[in-house]
Amino acid sequence: MKTFKCAIIEDSNTQRMLLEQIIDKNKNLKVVHSSSATNESLALVNDLEVDFLFLDIEMPVMNGFEFLAGLTIQPQVIITSHDQKYALDAFEFNVTDFLLKPYSNSRFDTAIAKAIDKIKAIKKKQPESKLVVKHNLKQVELNVHGILYVEALGDYVKVVTEERNYVILSTMSAFNKRLEADKFIRIHKSYIVNLKMVERYNHEFIEIKNKKIPISRAKIVELDQLLNCID
């Protein structure tokens, strides 16, 4: 079994240390980040693409729900809180489990087992042509083959398909990493294109469904090579 990357977002140093000690005893888990909730820690958790997120709710700078809303990844989220009143709202965010502090080691193990089972089920159910993204705070499945192009929109990206557009909180770099390198290319700082959707091109722009998309000079040779290799 793979080792799952874990992040702990908790404002109490004592609680973080206790959770780190529990996680260290599990050979399938590894803590890659541990801190309170801030804009910096949110960006780091997204960049690290963690598998598990252990998240407190009541924190001084940013609460747990604000942190969840800012995620551009879909980790298995396990809420750790002293207050049961947050449980209902937590599950509205499709979290994996809710651990009421103080919790036992056996209860922690149950939450981990549930998270691993969910990861296995998602991997088994989801073919490679599907990509799970967060759109309007809900997880939706995108047909990767149906993506025409991806456009940068500040802190978001717009994924354009023939049916509709999806606005997703993500950087272009992070989204590009989730696409197959031999089927998609970032031809400009603001655009990623599906190579099979390219209808015509020159060394200044490509055209997809009457949309002219600029090409960076540094990408012209790579684009030529990839287009010539398409089945």
Image: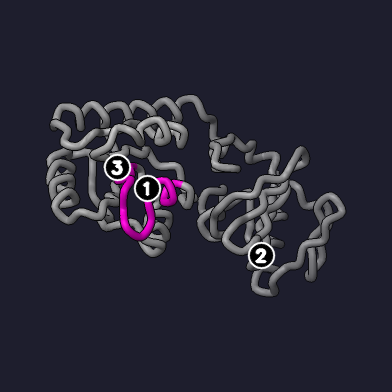
> Which residue type does callout 1 highlight?
Gly
Q: Which residues are magenta?
A: 52-68
User: How many numbered marks are there?
Assistant: 3
Name the secondary structure under disc 3: strand
Left or right: 133 as drawn, with respect to 190: left
Q: Is residue 38 above or below residue 96?
A: below
Residue at left 63%, top 61%? 186
Residue 225 magenta: no
Q: Which residue is mark 2?
A: 190
Residue at left 38%, top 60%? 44
Q: Which residue is mark 3?
A: 4
Please tell me whether mark 1 or mark 3 is closer to you in this view: 1
Q: Which residue is mark 1?
A: 64
Name the secondary structure under disc 1: helix
Marks 1 and 3: CB-CB under 8 Å?
A: no
Residue at left 20%, top 54%? 12
| Snapshot quadrant of residue 106 | top left
The foreground one among 138 and 56 is 56
- Residue 222 in percent (x, y) is at 65, 64
Name the secondary structure under disc 2: loop
Q: Residues within 10 Å of mark 1 (few under 14, many from 20)?
A: many
| Snapshot quadrant of residue 138 | top right
Left or right: 179 as drawn, with respect to 34: right
Q: Residues within 10 Å of mark 2 (few under 14, many from 20)?
A: some
> Marks 2/1: CA distance?
31 Å
